[in-house]
Amino acid sequence: MLQRFFSGRGFYLGDMFEQAAGRHGGVTVALDKPLDVAPSAGTGHTYRTIADLVEALAAQLWAAGVRPTERVTLYKSDNFDLALLTCALSRIGAVPALLSPTLDGTVVVELLRRLDRPWLITDAAKLAGPLQGPALTGLTRQWQRNLQARLDALWSRFGTLRDG
């Protein structure tokens, strides 16, 4: 998607799972709970299926309009998909800004203000909890209420890769 700016040196988050899949594609990865971004995918994965999911997430984020150098705040319940979303954002050249899931809404609003209208990826638990009171209008580029459903639908198209 994005032309590489590196000369093959260093650690690049966007390719981390793809490189792992290239070396150890069939190695089992057992999660303690399903991914929020793809709950129907279950808890049993391989490096290959995780790499495919990172690619699918990157494509979905690109389709949503996220572009290189844009800041994207991740403030959602703690789960392994935070790492996958971070890698997907890095893969398309966006700048992930991870906020601790334990922050309260007023702190999150102030950090969003300081990030100067970033994209916001959050979940229903944060919208119904810490983000319920604060006004988010004008603080973010887009408020993705249905991201989980959209990503789960996208994952279902890639589900056959889980068996391969």
Image (cartoon, helix red, strand yellow):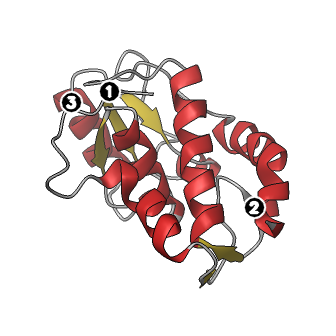
* Res. 30 image quadrant: bottom right
* Res. 138 image quadrant: top left
Left/right placement of residue 69 relative to residue 78 reads left
Number of the label disc, if any, that sits on residue 11: none
Place of residue 53 in the rendered image (x, y in percent of width and height, measured from the top left)? 62, 53
Place of residue 79 in the rendered image (x, y in percent of width and height, measured from the top left)? 52, 68
Q: Which residue is mark 3?
A: 115
Q: Quadrant of the N terminus?
A: top left
SS for dot 3: loop
Q: Choose between 22 and 121: the one closer to the eye.
A: 22
Q: Choose between 161 and 105: the one closer to the eye.
A: 161
Q: Which residue is mark 1?
A: 3
- Between marks 1 and 2 in the image, the one whose residue lies nearer the viewer: 1
> From mark 3 to mark 1, how far is it between C-alphas?
26 Å
Q: Earlier in the sequence, mark 3 or mark 2?
A: 2
From this viewpoint, is residue 78 visible? no
Q: Quadrant of the C terminus?
A: bottom right
The vertical placement of 148 against 2, above or below, is below
SS for dot 2: helix
- Between marks 3 and 2 in the image, the one whose residue lies nearer the viewer: 2
Q: Which residue is mark 2?
A: 39
Q: Amino acid at mark 3?
A: Leu
Q: Earlier in the sequence, mark 1 or mark 2?
A: 1
Q: Choose between 157 and 75: the one closer to the eye.
A: 157
Q: Amino acid at mark 1?
A: Gln
Which residue is located at x 52 percent, y 38 percent? Answer: 58
